[in-house]
Structure formats: structure tokens, C-alpha cells
Amino acid sequence: MGAYLIRRLWQMIPTMLGVILLVFFLFTQFGGDPAQVLAGKITDQAQIDNIRKELGVDQPVYVQLWIFVKQVFTFDFGRSWVTKEEVSHIFKQRAGPSLTVMTPILLIELLLGVALAMWVAYRRGTVSDRAVMIICILAMSVSFLVYIIAGQYLFGFVLGWFPVQGWSDNLWRNLTYFAPLPILLAVLVGLGPTIRLYRSVFLDELGHDYVRTARAKGLSERAVMFKHVLRNALIPIITNLAMALPGLVLGAFLIEIFFSIPGLGREVKIAVDRSDFPVIKAITVYLAFATMVFNLIADLLYRWADPRVELR
């Protein structure tokens, strides 16, 4: 285990270097001249040159690349080109709201998805199974934007149960007052594909010989489902969870924009609109790093879920 962990951590280094090179050259070669973008309608070349010098983009490419590499490994991307705010401070301020919303969404969707998928898989072919699958397909056919607009109108304006927009500095107030509506809508959207995926996983496990053997030994259906089927179905569930975890870092664009949540998702949208390259590059690099870390955690969880898995 220790050797595998060290090897995987060592392999992250060339991967991160590849990400750094890709992000740097994409923004340098295809991102346009940031001085021209920030200058706007200014046509004075001297002022544009001063902006370019202030941003450091007048230096040779290898110098800019070395500065970018140091920024990545020191976690210091300087200041935003637009607001002059430190990028690290932006992350500290915006990560909290994103995690406040995305963490409950991920946990609720995981628990409800697994529970409902196990139930419909056990009742395969019945009316309830078909009804749940029809509901899932219908739910997946509707855009998330429609859910947001309809949810805000129904629960916010008509019923008045939840505020439509807003955020505060108090974590408990955010969780109990501002976050429930976006969490509810996001869970409703995500449950459809989650239940369909996990149902197929459980159905595949239910067809194996070990399930028939367990039933032949006289085990109850509850014991068969939770002690055998669920344990063997954990690997694809962990894989799906690892793919969703980077969303905790990035946040959700539509949720944060329409509910005025000051998270990373909305910050990315604002940075793209303003061509704020330091913020965009920082988020891109951090998201790539988080994805690699979550994949490593998923590989370690495979071993926990199934001792037969060999980490090489």
C-alpha cells in the first residue's frame, strides 16, 4: 500500500506539469492579449504597453512560464487583473459557500440514490419499478434551468417557503434558510441519472451466483442486499462518486448565479466575462489537482470495498 501510494504521488508530478504547460500555452497563445482586453476602448499604444508591462506579459515566454510554475507550487497566483484582489483570498472567500451547498447535495443524492436504486432493483419488473424509471426519465428530460425557474416561482414566490436569493456570513443560517431550495432542486435533478445507474449496478450483482448461494443458506433479503449485494456494488458507486467530487471544488454555475450564492462557480463565470486570466488559470489548475487527488482516494477505497483488488 505504501509503495503504491508513493508511486501514485510521484506520477502526479508529470501530470501536473502537463496540465501547467497546457493551461499556460492555451492562455498565452489563444487567450488573446490581456492588455488589449483590459484597455477596452483605449487606443493609446503607450497606455496599452504600460498595462502589458504591469501584467508582466511583455516578458519572454520562458520567463512567464517560470513565473506561472512558481505560482502553482507556491499557491500564489498574484492578484486579479480586474479587482486587484489576491487570488488566494478569492478562493478562501468563495470556497465556503460552494461547499455549503455542494456537500449536502452530494451526500443526499448518494444516500437517496443508493437506497432507491436498491429498492427498485429488488422489485424489478413490478409496477413500482417501472413507475420510478418513468419518473427518472421524465426528470432527466427537463433542463436544470427549468427546475430553477419553476422552483423559485413555486417555493419562493407562491408558497413563500424559501428565499429566492441571498446569502449571509452565518453558516447555520445559510444551511437552514438560504441553501435548502437550491439543494432540493439540485437533488431532484441529480437523482434521475443516479438511480438509473445504481439500479443497473445492483441488477447486475443480483444475477450472480453468490446471491443465490446466500439465499439458499437461508439469509434474509435484507442481509443479502446490504451485506452482499451492496458491498460488491460499491466499486462502481465509488467511481461515480469520485467523478462527482471535483464539483465540490468548482461549485455549480447555475445554482450560484440564479440564487446569488457567492461561490466559486459564480466567480468562474464572472472571471470569464472579465477575461480575468489569473483567476481562471488558478481554478483550472486547482480543479485538475483536486481531480487527481480524488481519483487516488477512489483507488484506495476500492481496496477497502473489495480486499481482492490489488493496487499495483
Image (tube, grey):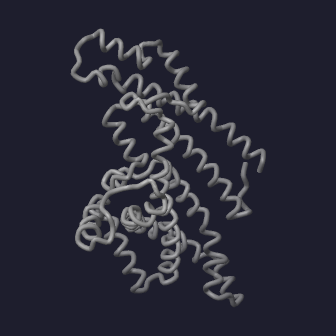
Where residue 309 appears, as percent x and y from the top left, is 71, 59
Residue drawn at x 30%, y 61% as measured from the top left: 164
Q: Is residue 58 left or right of residue 142?
A: right
Along the viewing direction, whichever of 126 and 20 lies nearer the viewer: 20
- Can you tell which quarter of the image residue 53 is in? top left
Where residue 36 appears, as percent x and y from the top left, is 30, 20
- Can you tell which quarter of the image residue 66 is in? top right
Along the viewing direction, whichever of 199 and 23 lies nearer the viewer: 23
**In the depicted structure, whether residue 60 falls above or below residue 146:** above
Q: Is residue 119 left or right of residue 301?
A: left
**In the depicted structure, whether residue 307 falls above or below residue 13:** below
- Can you tell which quarter of the image residue 35 is in? top left
Where residue 167 appears, as percent x and y from the top left, is 38, 55
Q: Given the current orientation, which residue lies at the most extreme top position?
A: 46
**In the depicted structure, whether residue 207 falls above or below residue 66:** below
Residue drawn at x 29%, y 60% as measured from the top left: 143
Where residue 68 appears, as percent x and y from the top left, is 52, 25
Residue drawn at x 54%, y 59% as measured from the top left: 241
Residue drawn at x 40%, y 47% as measured from the top left: 265
Q: Is residue 241 left or right of residue 82?
A: right
Total tally of numbered discs in the picture: 0
Q: Given the current orientation, which residue lies at the most extreme right position?
A: 2
**In the depicted structure, whether residue 299 falls above or below residue 110:** above
